[in-house]
Image (cartoon, rainbow, N blue to C red):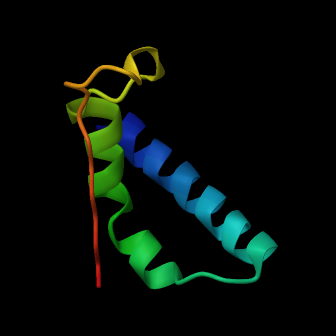
Amino acid sequence: MENLKALAYQLRETVIDMIVEGKAGHIGGDMSVMEILTELYFCQMDVSPENQDDPDRDKFVMSKG
């Protein structure tokens, strides 16, 4: 659990860097779901790079808006 919290924190820093570099973005939406996305992508979903062509690979669609 602590590792996931640390990873979510690192990903938040990456998102901030990307927004600053790109001079565009909405920080609130990005930050409010980071723990959920971290849990999904690193613990729940089957999205490993090795199975990109597998038709049974998990897919994720998100809309906050």
In this image, 58 relative to 42: left or right? Answer: left
Quarter location, residue 14:
bottom right
Q: Residue at x 44, y 83 (%)?
A: 28
- Residue 11 vs 4, above or below: the answer is below
Q: Residue at x 80, y 71 (%)?
A: 21
Quarter location, residue 56:
top left
Counting from the top left corner in percent of width and height, residue 5 is at 39, 47
Q: Residue furthest right?
A: 21
Q: Residue furthest top?
A: 50
Split into 4 quadrants, where in the image is the C terminus?
A: bottom left
Counting from the top left corner in percent of width and height, residue 37 is at 33, 52
Q: Foreground: 8 or 29?
A: 29
Q: Residue at x 72, y 65 (%)?
A: 17
In this image, 43 relative to 7: left or right? Answer: left
Counting from the top left corner in percent of width and height, residue 29 is at 40, 79
Quarter location, residue 50:
top left
- Residue 56 vs 42, above or below: the answer is above
Q: Foreground: 49 or 40?
A: 49
Counting from the top left corner in percent of width and height, residue 1 is at 28, 37
For the image, the number of numbered tags is: 0
Q: Residue at x 35, y 34 (%)?
A: 42
- Residue 27 vs 49, above or below: the answer is below
